[in-house]
Image (cartoon, grey):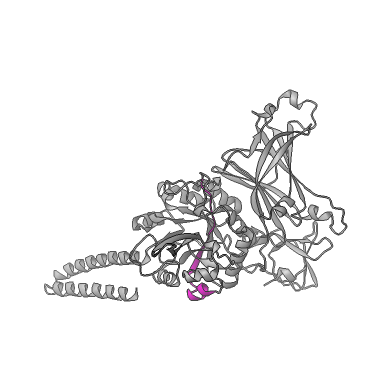
Amino acid sequence: MWDMWVFTLVRTAKVGFVFPKSVHNLNPHLELQNAGGPCQVIVSRWETHQLPRSLSPSEPELMIDDGHFGVHDGIECVDSGWLTCQTEIRLRLHYSVKPPVSITKKKFKTSRFRLKLMLEGIEEEEEESPSSWPEMTTTLEISLISDSGYKSRHSQPECGYALEPSRWTEYSIHTMDPDNLELTFEFYEEELSETVVQGDVHPGHMGTAILLSSTFVESGKDQGVVTLPIMSRNARQTIGKVRVDYLVTRPIQHFQCDMSQSFAKYWKKRSALDVGHRGAGSTHAHKHHKIRENTIASFLSAANHGAAYVEFDVHLSKDLVPIVYHDLTCCISTKKKFDKNSMLLVEVPVKDLTFDQLQLLKVRLISDSFIFQAVPDHVGFNIELKWICQFKDGSWDAKLSTYFNMNQFLDIILTCVLQNAGNRRIVFSCFDPDICTMVRQKQNKYPILFLTQGVTDLYPELMDIRCQSTKIAMSFAQSENILGISAHTDELLRNMEFIREAQSKGLVVFCWGDYNNDHENRMKLREHGIDGLIYDRWALICLAVLGNTCKTLKTCLEKLCSCLLKFKGIIYPKMKILSSCFISAYLFIYLFLV
């Protein structure tokens, strides 16, 4: 398999690719970036066939330009690249919290605006920083996401787009020089009168807001919100302000992805997969469980009862060790200060406890490959990446408004999985759309599903508009080119057409929630073509299924006996006894295996 990290590729302007003789793999579409420094490889697009096409060069150099990039055996498989050495900056304008633009100037109070983002590199006096870097490697695109659809990664129109309450507007910038950019928001009036347009070089242009990318570095945060003043066009006065949400994604540290294999968008259609929730099921909400959730025993139990995947949550301890634990907090019992006979439960964030402290609470880890080694390779892992979320009322999950650095958090967990997964099937999932975006951008091997609760009365509504409905979750998944969504069964049961709609858009659909524990609901979802079912109580469910099977078997045997009775009257009593013995033996064997 070709290793792009030790290979020098030259892309000519119109001729095609020049390959050294030693290269045998024909699946890259690369840009060689080298401005007087070491070679940096940026993957713009690449072929993702499970069996990549190849060539055998007969000369020291070989020109390749067949005009069919991504097509092999009549099938096109092309995917966007991942972050190798460049950084991605995303600027978002949305109405999740409040309108992003606030105008104080009376003249423009009732105006409707269009926004356009302009991008420039800041000139430096030092000769060691070539001015060609920003021009050569920086790109700017815009994406629009709403309930009704999406328009992903495209160029802006001349005067930009108007902001809409139901739409998420996002600018994506890829750059090799993330700390040295000048980002300018240009504001235009959308409805222009003839008097405004006449004699105006820039008709409707009414203001500007400027953001320096160095602001992110100085803040020390890769995710946050900045408020910028909007300066009038003709005078040095403020006419309002704009609230900009930003996200900075950096390449994964200490690990290099290659092109050997990618499952980021690969899914083989089959009957619905059974996924064991937290292994054999949640145990906090149910009594009399012999096996604790999120333990090796729980994972093995689910696997032994037919689970294709086991689902579990992963986050980090205070000393940055990946751990398997469902909640963001845990309870520690301590004695009261003035009453030694009474105990007090104290709720502590998991992120504030070290790995050694968590071990005392029997919280499992994945950093030493223990889970990967203990569970058979044929059992897939659905790894939910645990992250805090904000509710519509402004409160935070587990009362945690601050968490880890998102890049650091993901780099540690992704590296752990990429190094230890081997041939095991892996599907990531997360309720936070930014986590989903980062996972897609940081690596090219494993897929991720966007978890969504949709419209429901069972949970508080989330602040982020991308999380507020299954419809917009579909649009987000399409826009980010991720595998699919994991929807809440409560909403799917009320809108079964969502399953086919999502699948018609090229998305895989899993579902989760307590409603999945009902056999009838699972049957309905299977009939409508669901791709994966995440549910609890595997042993009890399997026992119920076995009981139904035994009842059916007994009915069939009795019917068979009644038929035989017509020919020989003595057969029926003997066969009835035989059927009862057979069913008893069947149950005994099952219970022994459990």
Q: Is residue 579 left or right of residue 242?
A: left
Q: Quick check: is 101 in the magenta stretch?
A: no
Along the line of sight, which residue is nearer the eye, 419 or 225? 225
Q: Quick check: is 389 in the magenta stretch?
A: yes
Q: Is residue 503 left or right of residue 527?
A: right
Residue 73 seen in this snapshot? no
Residue 545: x and y in percent read 32, 64
| Relative vertical location of residue 464 with respect to residue 346 in this rendering, above or below | above
Residue 372: x and y in percent read 52, 73
User: Residue at image x 63%, y 38%?
Assistant: 163
Residue 304: x and y in percent read 40, 72
Single out the residue that lies furthest toward the front.
338
Single out the residue that lies furthest toward the top.
195
Quarter of the figure with the N terminus: bottom right
User: Residue at image x 36%, y 70%?
Assistant: 290
Magenta stretch: give its range.
Answer: 369-391
Along the line of sight, which residue is nearer the eye, 336 or 468? 336
- Rendered image quadrant of residue 27: bottom right
Residue 180 seen in this snapshot? yes
| Relative vertical location of residue 417 with respect to residue 125 in this rendering, above or below | below
- Rendered image quadrant of residue 300: bottom left
Along the line of sight, which residue is nearer the eye, 408 or 299? 408
- Rendered image quadrant of residue 570: bottom left
Q: Is residue 58 left or right of residue 417?
A: right
Q: Is residue 363 left or right of residue 200?
A: left
| Relative vertical location of residue 149 with respect to residue 363 in this rendering, above or below | above
Residue 128: x and y in percent read 86, 59
